[in-house]
Amino acid sequence: MPSPIRRHPLAAQVADVLLERLQAGEWPLGHRLPGETTLAAQLGVGRSTLREAIRELSGKGVLDSRQGAGVFVTALDAPGDRETVLRHASIVSVIEARIAIEAEAAGLAAVRRTPADLRAIRRALRERRTDGRTIDSIDNIGTIDAHVDADMAFHRTVVRAAHNDVLTELFDGFVPRVRPAMIDMLRLRPLVSGEADHAVHEALVRAVVDRDPGAAMESSRSHLTALKEAFL
């Protein structure tokens, strides 16, 4: 149950409650929040207060307000000092850290995954395919954003399947830094083949399903290494 709203200013309290609900899993990474009227009524605040709270979380990289589309979840953490470090780190450095985190998480996921984890991973893979099918030729900015969000959501399900809260927290901390860089890269340099890119992710899922930690780690590492080289 989210904490009651008590402190002032009110918008900051609303932002805290929204963040609590995000971290509790009410709105997964990449998903859209309920409409402004509905959400304001749920929280018992005015729409102007809700907008201010959303602006605060958007400024921290947690939410993304897209004109005509709604408000989307882009991270599940609001980093403090870590945000400063990541802002000054090169995207290549961040990807290298992702390799260390995600390759290990993939190996653990292949050993520890549960039936519920597999359902979540397969669902995220399907959603990624829907958003990535034409990403190699698309010039629609909203579609690129959706693809990146679907991709990050997929990778998070694999990390979560490792059942290591520290790895999940570290991954969530990288999302605000990686997401805009990925979007910029795809705008300038679309994928050569969306199908080939998706096949790499399917291979990772097969390794997790087959309980093959070595193959899962190698699949994750090779994919992210190719991503790093694309930035170089």
Image (cartoon, rainbow, N blue to C red):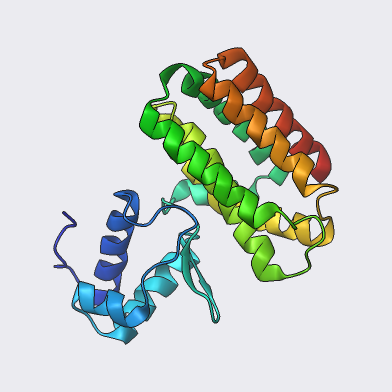
Residue 2 x, y percent position in the rendering: 19, 57
Q: Against 222, is 92 above or below? A: below
Residue 197 x, y percent position in the rendering: 74, 41
Residue 77 x, y percent position in the rendering: 41, 50
Residue at image x 50%, y 60%? 61
Q: Is residue 184 left or right of residue 63?
A: right
Q: How many marks?
A: 0
Q: Against 10, is 117 above or below? A: above
Residue at image x 76%, y 56%? 186
Residue at image x 41%, y 32%? 117
Q: Quadrant of residue 89?
A: top right
Q: Against 59, is 130 above or below? A: above
In depth, the one of 146 and 52 nearer the eye is 146
Q: Quadrant of residue 166?
A: top left
Whether residue 176 is visible to the viewer of this picture, yes or no, is yes
Residue at image x 51%, y 26%? 105
Quadrant (top left, top right, bottom left, bottom right) of the C terminus: top right
Q: Quadrant of residue 229?
A: top right
Q: Is residue 43 left or right of residue 211?
A: left
In depth, the one of 41 and 197 nearer the eye is 197
Whether residue 165 is visible to the viewer of this picture, yes or no, is no
Residue 11 x, y percent position in the rendering: 29, 75
Quadrant (top left, top right, bottom left, bottom right) of the N terminus: bottom left
